[in-house]
Image (tube, helix red, strand yellow):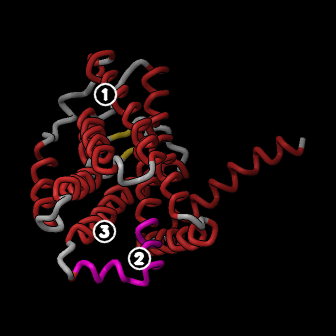
């Protein structure tokens, strides 16, 4: 009896909280969101002692999103609502990161990225060949060069100078900028469709969580270095500035989507709908 009562009270409490939040003004909702993000950052700083652990959690969040896609493709037998362009951009920056980091970081990082890349390539294969008839190509209409060319220009401007490791450093900056905007084709497809299927919404939300954790990692690095990292920007290391801006761009691109995701969950909506602009 106690378990049943708890099970019925929990959804009711969530609905009440949802109604209370929805009754607040937009300014109050934004303020509550900012406060919640700051509190979460403080909790992460207190309980996550090693930077490597935060990286692992970030990768787990990304992998969780990919597992949702794998489940969707395996169970529903359709790729409707998924952007092939976003998956291809994800594969591109993962390949570049594995190449740039190989021999530079621990093998564990390379292993995590390799597993993520393998899942991404499987999703690409399923969309391109297995379930091609369900792929909404007309809605996934953002050309890849809209992302790759501007990112290359940013990487050229932001590279750390003509040094010995210029190629690996260029790839490092290039992959960061690609990663920052790789979700844009998926958001464009969602905007064209005017609604989001549950599995696709879960996937994009998982990406939002991963990006928040990655941004938190950079914030903690700045705090731990007491701002020393920022001083290197003045010495011509513009790639640090590019890295910071990339994290901010990624977070803000997905923050808006995550807001409407949480809002739709609290309202009990199965199909997530977005306003005219994301």
Label 3, label 1: how far apart the Cα atoms are: 29 Å
Q: Which residues are magenta?
A: 217-233
Residue tagged 3: 244
Quadrant into which the N terminus falls? top right
The residue that appears at 40% across and 37% down in the rendered structure is: 114
Image quadrant assignment for residue 46: bottom right
N-terminal-most mark, 3 or 2: 2
Residue sitting nearer the eye, 268 or 118: 118
As measured in the structure, the alpha-carbon distance from the residue carrying label 3 to the one carrying label 2 is: 10 Å
- Which residue bears the numbered disc 2? 222
Q: Which of labels 1 and 2 is toward the front? A: 2
Residue at 21 percent of width and 82 percent of height: 234
Is 45 displayed left or right of 152 in the figure? right
Residue 184: where, in percent of width, then height?
25, 48
| Marks 1 and 2, the one that precedes in the sequence | 1
Q: Residues within 10 Å of mark 2 (few under 14, many from 20)?
A: some
Is 225 colored magenta in this rendering?
yes
Q: Position of residue 130 (x, y in %)?
A: 32, 15
Mark 3 is surrounded, within 10 Å at the Cα level, by few (under 14), some (14 to 19) or many (20 or more) other residues, namely: some
Q: Which residue is mark 1?
A: 124
Dominant SS of magenta comes to helix
Instruction: Please tell me whether mark 1 sits on a helix, a strand or a loop.
Output: helix
Regarding mark 2 in the picture, which secondary structure is present there?
helix
Along the viewing direction, whichever of 79 and 94 lies nearer the viewer: 94
Q: Position of residue 55 (x, y in %)?
A: 48, 56
């Amino acid at each position: 009896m106690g378990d049943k009562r708890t099970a019925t009270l929990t959804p009711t409490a969530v609905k009440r909280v949802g109604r209370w939040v929805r009754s607040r003004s937009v300014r109050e909702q934004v303020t509550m969101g900012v406060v919640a993000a700051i509190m979460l950052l403080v909790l992460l700083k207190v309980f996550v002692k090693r930077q490597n652990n935060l990286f692992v959690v970030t990768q787990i969040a990304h992998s969780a999103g990919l597992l949702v896609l794998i489940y969707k493709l395996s169970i529903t037998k359709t790729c409707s609502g998924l952007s092939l362009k976003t998956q291809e951009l994800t594969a591109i920056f993962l390949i570049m990161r594995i190449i740039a980091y190989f021999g530079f970081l621990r093998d564990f990082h390379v292993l995590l990225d390799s597993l993520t890349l393998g899942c991404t390539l499987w999703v690409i294969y399923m969309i391109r060949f297995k379930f091609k008839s369900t792929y909404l190509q007309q809605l996934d209409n953002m050309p890849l060069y809209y992302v790759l060319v501007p990112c290359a220009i940013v990487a050229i401007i932001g590279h750390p100078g003509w040094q010995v490791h210029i190629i690996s450093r260029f790839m490092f900056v290039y992959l960061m900028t690609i990663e920052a905007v790789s979700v844009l084709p998926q958001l464009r497809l969602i905007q064209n469709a005017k609604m989001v299927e549950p599995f696709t919404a879960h996937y994009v939300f998982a990406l939002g969580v991963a990006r928040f954790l990655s941004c938190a990692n950079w914030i903690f690095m700045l705090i731990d270095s007491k701002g020393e990292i920022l001083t290197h920007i003045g010495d011509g290391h513009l790639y640090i500035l590019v890295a910071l801006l990339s994290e901010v761009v990624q977070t803000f691109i997905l923050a808006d989507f995550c807001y409407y995701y949480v809002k739709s969950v609290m309202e009990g909506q199965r199909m997530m709908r977005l306003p005219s602009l994301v």
